[in-house]
Image (cartoon, rainbow, N blue to C red):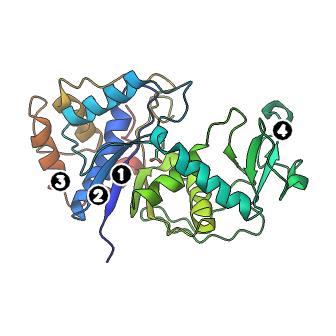
Amino acid sequence: MAPYRGRFAPSATGPLHLGSIFAALVSYIHAKHHNGEWLIRIDDLDEKRCKAIYSDSILKCLDAFGFKPSEAVRFQTERISDYALALKSLESKSLLYSCDCTRKSLPRGPYPGMCRHRIGQALIEGNAVRIDTNGIDLDIQDLFTPVRRMSPPGDFIIKRRDGLFAYQLACAIDEHIDQITHVIRGIDLLESTPMQCFISKLLGYQSPSYGHFPVLVGADGAKLSKQTFATPVDWDQPGHSFATIARLLLLNDTPSEIDSAEIWLDYFLSLDNFLSIIVKASEANTLSI
Ligand code: GLU
């Protein structure tokens, strides 16, 4: 059996909030329950939204919460040449095309294909790059969610018109370079999975196994996110955040708010049915803060 290698991949777009700690916790527990390695990757490609102070704060915070990675932290910005090579390889298979459609000019939903006549032509500098998804057939199994045969939402962008490699391309390559066997992440990222699997398949990589779990939501039912300025966690009081998570999961006999991060992690690790606890809480609608 391939050794287990999992990861947590926060974007460096803001400090971690309770939803991020929950996501880190689920991927960490899943890895540890499988005697696996657990890595941290900082998704910092988007130079307009990502800042070094956020990467620093995210790493300090994860450390204060006891999440120690098995290997050195990875940064997407250190992998630009890997993404460029992968793009070249896809280009040589005549799977890419330049697209100069503006977002405003496009209807909602899958890309209607106005620029598909450029498939196989040389890429044009300053245009976005789309990938041809015609005739694709993916059989994706999720470890926690009963989904099969998801497809990418039409020809999606793998390089943006501002020259940045898109998350879907970068993420597929990262999992390959880091030899990730298990991507355990929130259900909000489920729709990214067929795009990432599609790219892996075209590049001849073995896709990892995927498991998408229910996420914490705000009072409005929307996922907690850095974009909507969810309150940052206090890394001087990890027990406080862990206790809130335990409460949302309807757990009893937990450590206390003033207990250390290590005591809390040991406690969560002692729950061998952690995933079913999350699913039950989600069904009972208690994952809302
Ligand atoms: N960095 C992205 C996020 O925080 C993706 C994470 C992932 O693929 O797990 O939403």
For residue 149, side relative to residue 146 (left or right): right
Label 1 vs label 3, nearer the camera: 1
Q: The N terminus lies in which quarter of the figure? A: bottom left
- CB atoms of marks 4 and 2 within 8 Å: no
Q: Which residue is mark 4?
A: 100
Q: Which numbered disc, 2 or 3, marks the residue that appears first in the sequence?
A: 2
Q: Which residue is mark 1?
A: 7
Label 4 vs label 2, nearer the camera: 4
Decide which of 215, 56 is in the foreground and name it. Answer: 56
Q: Which numbered disc, 1 or 2, marks the residue that appears first in the sequence?
A: 1
User: For the residue with label 1, is its CB less than 8 Å from the closest atom of ligand 1?
Assistant: yes
> Which residue lies at the image location 55% right of the left edge and 56% below the top edge?
193
Q: The C terminus lies in which quarter of the figure? A: top left
Amino acid of disc 4: Asp
Q: CA distance from mark 4 to mark 2?
A: 42 Å
* Residue 20 place in picture, x, y as percent: 37, 37
Amino acid of disc 2: His
Q: Secondary structure at mark 1?
A: strand
* Residue 166 place in picture, x, y as percent: 61, 43
Decide which of 110, 5 is in the foreground and name it. Answer: 5
Q: Which of the 4 image quadrants contains residue 40? A: top left
Q: Which residue is mark 2?
A: 30
- CB atoms of marks 3 and 4 within 8 Å: no
Q: Which residue is mark 3?
A: 269
